[in-house]
Image (cartoon, grey):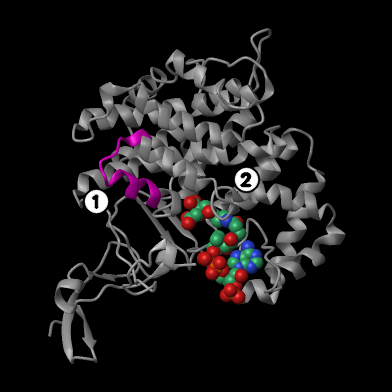
Amino acid sequence: MSSNTVTIRDNRTGKEAEFPILHGNEGDPVFDISSLYSKLGMFTLDPGFRSTASCESKITFIDGDTGVLLYRGYPIEQLAEQCDHLEVCYLLLNGELPSSKQLTDFKRVISRHTMMHEQLLQLYRGYRRDAHPMAIVLGVVGALSAFYHDSLDIRDPHHRQVSAYRIIAKMPTIAAAAYKYSTGQPFMYPRNNLGYAENFLYMLFAVPCEEYVVSPVLARAMDRIMILHADHEQNASTSTVRLAGSSHANPFGAISAGVGSLWGPAHGGANEAVLKMLKAIGTVERIPEFIKRAKDPDDPFRLMGFGHRVYKNYDPRAKILRQTAHEVLHEIGHRDDPLLQVAMKLEEIALEDEYFARKKLYPNVDFYSGLILSAMGIPTNMFTVIFAVSRCIGWITQWNEMIASNEGIGRPRQLYVGAGHRDVVPLFERG
Ligand code: SDX
């Protein structure tokens, strides 16, 4: 019996099987159970995948106990401080930080893909003006596969690269157009002389009839938000993209599926839910009432922006965004924003509360991002769209890694607990 294995014994039959323990470069080991069914005739059951690793990956590492987040080995704190979002996109896609020339060339290539096919703009007109922008983005991203037939062969590395460039470049344009459509204002075309985040804010807030200059502080804040949301290991939406892409569906369809998963309030929709919660709380005096509700097992209310499946310590992204929130609110003169006061007090009370300490519930990335976006004048229903714009690089990078792994289609099994075999009773006999 090798020391680097796990032995599983079926006590019903006495049958035993050994499974190899695999060690990564960081984090907890795994044991490979891919041969479990052939050796013991059983499957594992792990709803919510609380104890399951779905793949090997070289992209992002999280240590939930110590609050560590690394993109290709680099700490998120250093990347957020020293890099810009496209630099991080290059790192995630290629595995190494770019040289100055590589970054210049990458930014030039991305800028050549920022416009959408003009007919795609017609698609927006099929939506109600009051449609949630995530519904529009979900549809338009999927519709990219109806226009870019020259980059859908997933077996062709060049096609995969062009699709990645198109997703990175077009997501801000798609997202900004969804916002413009909701306001009745004309779409703004990208300006390729602007930075990535700056261009996004320009397309959101500029109008054709006058000059619009983006605040460098707000552009830097948006760029930092994008870096912090870029990737996060095998979260729900990324796992959705991997599973959807494992059927060899085209990348735009797979990413559209990821958009749909991110929309949920338990995931990327939490930033929108945080703002709604802070507005519902309204004043510092009402915080205890909501803390009480969050602790009540019979009350479905949860403190949005708190808790995380992996982080059982402070989400490192929340720490950085906390600082950014103060910078942005100071810049726009809202440092006394009542919502920020409520958020700061809520964080202070929750972190001192025994329930949250015992459950290891800390502020996550969504707790502060909504405050910053709201201060930037972005409507609440655009918050998750901005999460999707930021996360698309993570999705396409993880999709690329899944395609290159040749693991085949993802097809989990189940524990069937439904009705046993039975025959149909003819309708006339059923009364
Ligand atoms: C993101 O996976 C990722 O990496 C996601 C993400 C990314 O970058 O992709 O980090 C982005 O999605 C961040 C999370 C945003 N969601 C929220 O802020 C919504 C509020 N949080 C919860 O819904 C919850 O914390 C989850 C969904 C985030 C995590 O849920 P888990 O891991 O399934 O934990 P759980 O629901 O089993 O909760 C454990 C206990 C429960 O109590 P008991 O049943 O054990 O008594 O903690 C309680 C929960 O009731 N709990 C909370 C709580 N979150 C968990 N109680 C009050 N308020 C909360 N927010």
Residue located at (28% from left, 41% from top): 400
Ligand 1's quadrant: bottom right
How far across and down, in percent of the image, does residue 360 sit?
58, 71
**What label sits on residue 80 in the rendered view?**
none
Q: Position of residue 340 (x, y in %)?
A: 76, 48
Closer to viewer: mark 1 or mark 2: 1
Label 1, residues with CA under 10 Å away: few <14, some 14-19, many ≥20: some
Q: Which residues are magenta?
A: 239-252
- Residue 206: image quadrant is top right
Q: What residue does disc 1 label?
A: 409
131 relative to 122 in the view: left or right = right
Return the disc, 1 or 2, that comes first in the chain's sequence.
2
Q: Nearer the viewer, residue 22 or 11?
A: 11
Query: Depth check: 199 or 130 in front?
Result: 130
Q: Which residue is mark 2?
A: 369
The secondary structure making up most of the magenta span is: helix
> In which image quadrant can residue 412 be found?
bottom left
| Foreground residue among 291 and 193 | 291
Q: Residue at x 61, y 47 (%)?
A: 321
Tell me which residue sits at (25%, 41%) in the image.
248
Q: Is residue 42 above or below residue 80?
A: below
Q: Amino acid at mark 1?
A: Ile
Q: Is residue 353 left or right of residue 71?
A: right
The residue lying at 55 percent from left, 50 percent from top is: 264
